[in-house]
Image: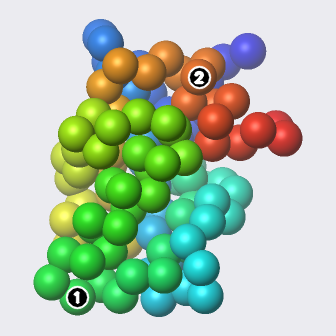
Amino acid sequence: MPAPNWLAVDEASIILTVRVVPRAHKSEIAGVQGEALRVRLAAPPVEGAANRALVAFLADCLSVRPQQVRLEAGERSRQKRVRVVGLTAAQALERLLPRA
């Protein structure tokens, strides 16, 4: 099965394209929007709070350490690119979209 458009493989890491919705009722994966994984975050987009919350949330969802998750692009945008080290595309898909 080919990887979805929002997930790319790069050497020993994966790169996720994420569309963030800040100030949500709760933090959750909200499916796919276009070519991005849609993530709702309870944190506001103030002083990097949403970026820190995104890294922590993805680390928890993917069962990796927060140090393995790094925001690569989109620091001030809703569309972000996140690198996750030490995880395969299949593992990421299984953990992010368990019912897919």
Residue at the (39%, 82%) spot, across then down: 43
Residue 49, image x, y percentages? 25, 77
Q: Is residue 88 above or below residue 16?
A: above
Front-most of residues 6 and 95: 95
Give neighbour class at mark 2: few <14, some 14-19, many 20+ (Cα, 10 Å).
Answer: few
Amino acid carrying mark 1 in the image: Val
Q: Which residue is mark 2?
A: 91
Residue at the (39%, 26%) spot, across then down: 14
Q: Report the label total.
A: 2
Q: Is residue 63 above or below residue 57?
A: above
Question: Element under label 1?
Answer: loop
The N terminus lies in quadrant: top right
Residue at the (33%, 38%) spot, across then down: 65
Front-most of residues 66 and 41: 66
Please state if 20 lies on the left or on the right of 2 as rendered: left
- Alpha carbon distance from label 1 to label 2: 32 Å
* Mark closest to the chain's N terminus, 1 or 2: 1
Residue 62 seen in render? yes
Give neighbour class at mark 1: few <14, some 14-19, many 20+ (Cα, 10 Å).
Answer: few
Front-most of residues 62 and 79: 62
Please state if 16 lies on the left or on the right of 75 as rendered: right
Q: Is residue 3 above or below residue 54?
A: above
Please state if 3 lies on the left or on the right of 72 as rendered: right
What label does residue 90 carry, if any?
A: none
Q: Which residue is mark 1?
A: 46
Amino acid carrying mark 2 in the image: Gln
Residue 17, image x, y percentages? 43, 47
Q: Are marks 1 and 2 in contact (CB under 8 Å)?
A: no
Q: Is residue 11 above or below residue 53?
A: above
Residue 45, image x, y percentages? 30, 84
Residue 42, image x, y percentages? 48, 81
Scheme of colours in the image: rainbow
